[in-house]
Amino acid sequence: MAYATAKSVAPDTIPVIDITPLREGAGTREVAAALHQASQGLGFIYIRGHGIPDTLIDEARCAAFDFFRADQSKKTEVLISSSHRGWLKPGQAKMDDDARVDLKESFIWGYQNNQERALQGHPLRGANQWPGFVPSLEDCSMAYFTAADQVARHLLRGFATGLELPEDFFLQRADTPLSRASYVYYPAQPEDCGEEQFGVGPHTDFGVLTVLCQDDTGGLQVQDINGDWIHAPPIDGTLIVNVGDLLSRWTAGAYKSTPHRVVNTSGRERLSLVLAFDPDPDTVIDAASIPGLTPSEEPTTCGDYLLWRFAKAFSYRQKPEAD
């Protein structure tokens, strides 16, 4: 038996874009044009100049490892809630009906402040759960969430500018977003699991935009336009971002939501820091709102679409069959 394989490709296959001008408000059109071009191709982009301090990333990683390396009995105190907050244990996610369950486990949290609206009004909104046995986890996780959220908002302004839209087009309703952050832990994957076993199986991301901070382990694989799987190795100092299904739908497929998967062949544990950015749940996703585009799908709302996808992907949200 063997691992699922992927090709190594030229370093420039997945573009690397410095978004410092977006953060500083100068030279934004050049960056927006580069983002626009990249999003019409593979839909994956390495980002430099993101502004998240290395110290914050390191602190978040250390706290996350403290959580995942703890006994399962401790982690169950924050077992995943109905609002998708807390610990998603191994075996609770699979990306396709016919696939094996993923090897990964995750810790998930979301937007958090003193506004009641942030915790109400949608099934995927609710209180975060923080484990008492890792007291540092809340502060560093919320700091990371805030920093990654800013990166996503800069990028979405760039995408809007690239489409010759008002820069706030994708952010008009994003005061209390449905965004989720997660630490995703991949154990070393034994080779004898075979080619059909994945840390996370082939899938496209559900929402608008994903911001991923890889470690140096590797294992991310992306499907190119020819249907071949290629490696997306970590590049020091970068994040990797990708278009999600809702942004692809919003742009009538002009921006590509690309299948990807993780195969951890390293022999050691792997940890990713992920932000899935999504606007307010009542945001209407409709390509007809963008001049010149012809919708290929009916309008939906961000909240309705995510509920549908979550119900398919996560076993804890599925009702048991009647006897």
Image (spheres, rainbow, N blue to C red):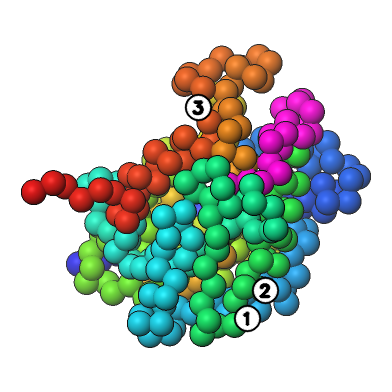
- For the point 53% across and 18% down, the residue is 295
Q: Position of residue 136 (x, y in %)?
A: 63, 81
> Any magenta on residue 177?
yes
User: Which three-letter amino acid code belongs to the residue tagged 3?
Assistant: Thr
Is 159 placed above or below 125 here?
above
Sequence-first tag of 1 and 3: 1
Q: Are marks 1 and 2 in contact (CB under 8 Å)?
A: yes
Q: Of helix, strand and loop, which one carries label 1?
A: loop
- Name the residue tied to disc 3: 300
- Name the residue tied to disc 2: 139
Q: Of helix, strand and loop, which one carries label 3?
A: strand
User: Which three-letter amino acid code belongs to the residue tagged 1?
Assistant: Ser
Is 206 placed above or below 145 here?
above
User: Which three-letter amino acid code belongs to the residue tagged 2?
Assistant: Asp
The answer for how far apart the CA atoms under marks 2 and 3 are is 35 Å
Task: Sort mark 3 into few (<14), some (14-19) or many (20+) by Cα contacts within 10 Å.
Answer: some
